[in-house]
Image (cartoon, rainbow, N blue to C red):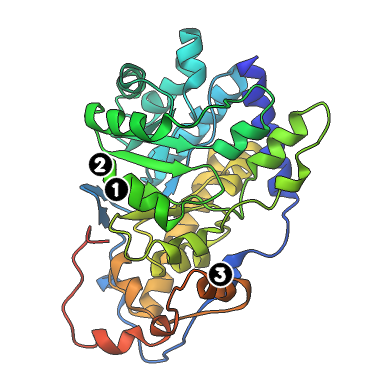
Amino acid sequence: MIANRKDDHVRFAAEQQRRPDGHNQFDDVSFVHHALAGIDRTDVSLTTRFGGIEWPVPLYINAMTGGSAKTGLINRDLAIAAHETGVPIATGSMSAYFADDAVADTFSVMRRENPKGFIIANVNANATVDKARRAIDLLEADALQIHLNSIQETVMPEGDRAFSSWGPQIGRIVAGAGVPVIVKEVGFGLSRETLERLRELGVTVADVAGSGGTNFARIENDRRDRADYTFLNGWGQSTPACLLDAQGAGIPVLGSGGVRHPLDVVRALALGASAVGASGLFLTTVLDGGPPALIALISGWLDQLKALMTALGSRNPAELTRCDVLISDGLRDFCADRDIDIRRLATRSRSHRGGPEPIGGTR
């Protein structure tokens, strides 16, 4: 049954990606153009540092799948692309492995195809410390993701219905994992209050994983005999909204959810993300064209990311937080309701002219 569910997730996620909803709140973020801000491309580095982690690029393949024969092949292809491009990669939820270790290879194939890459194992917030360690050991993982998905579980016919233990269990996993732990949502966003709670639990990195990309409420609703949770299709906060809400929460954040192209990556970095993840577009790309297509796409993104940073005058991803950005439309309304001061974002470059280079890992 778990294998069938994993295959359903991939099928419905790909269908969503091929029929996008339209407006994305990344479009509510724009840069003030300064015509003399540009620097030399040779001075630009894509290296990013956060929460004790250093990556050569601020882009990663976020959690997708695993647990069935079909999804094992997808993980193989994703890992090949990660190996060729040098981007970090996260596996999908490893709950299927805990239920049946016969599917272990659908996850461990990532390490086999990407022996020296940065690989992130993935478990749910109900996992025991022992299960978390098993997941890490299977992949020889460099970090662990704990995913939060209460809305998905609510709509999922066979989903969990008890969430009160999640916070304390996250604290136990963080203490016993032995590797950096990244707590992420699955597409409904992390609020400032949630980030502050995670910080109190000892979490050192969080992925806000907001709405705008794959919608797991819709996916689980499509799996039901009757689509009776359609009213939850618009639940959650967008990734840009979460990144703005996260400012001052005291924990480094990653940004994923609704990322469509390199400009969205730069927007997320400018709003405070230390790195940016993508799933949906990468999934359909590898399904349609295999590893060569995804390698070409990611390589192009990295090249364009460096080009945009050159034009914006940012020598590294952290310096993008010095760029002047404008917030408009629905995202502006969100900031007003959450008491987020966006006026300073439009003029922040003035306070950094001639200042010292930001130190990676401080966000």
User: Residue at image x 52%, y 18%?
Assistant: 96
Name the image quarter holding residue 83. Answer: top left
Asked whether, in this view, residue 248 is left or right of residue 299, the answer is: left
Residue 80 shows in the view: no
User: Residue at image x 33%, y 17%?
Assistant: 134
The answer to whether 8 is drawn above or below residue 85 in the figure is above
The answer to whether 29 is drawn above or below residue 184 in the figure is below
User: Residue at image x 38%, y 88%?
Assistant: 347
Name the residue tied to disc 2: 202
Under mark 1, the amino acid is: Arg
Asked whether, in this view, residue 258 is left or right of residue 85, the answer is: right
Residue 263 shows in the view: yes
In what quadrant of the picture does the N terminus appear? top right
Under mark 2, the amino acid is: Gly
The residue lying toward the viewer, choosing from 201 and 96, is 201
**Residue 100: image location, x then y, percent:** 50, 9
Badge 1 density bin: few <14, some 14–19, many ≥20, Cα 10 Å: some
* SS for dot 1: helix
Q: CA distance from mark 1 to mark 2?
A: 5 Å
The residue lying toward the viewer, choosing from 77 and 187, is 187
The answer to whether 300 is drawn above or below residue 338 in the figure is above
Name the residue tied to disc 3: 334
* SS for dot 3: helix
**Residue 247: image location, x then y, percent:** 36, 65
Earlier residue among tags 3 and 1 = 1
> Which residue ends up furthest to the front in the rendered image?
164
- Contact (Cβ within 8 Å) of mark 3 with mark 1: no
Badge 2 density bin: few <14, some 14–19, many ≥20, Cα 10 Å: some
- Contact (Cβ within 8 Å) of mark 1 with mark 2: yes
The residue lying toward the viewer, choosing from 84 and 101, is 101
The residue lying toward the viewer, choosing from 275 and 183, is 183
Badge 3 density bin: few <14, some 14–19, many ≥20, Cα 10 Å: some
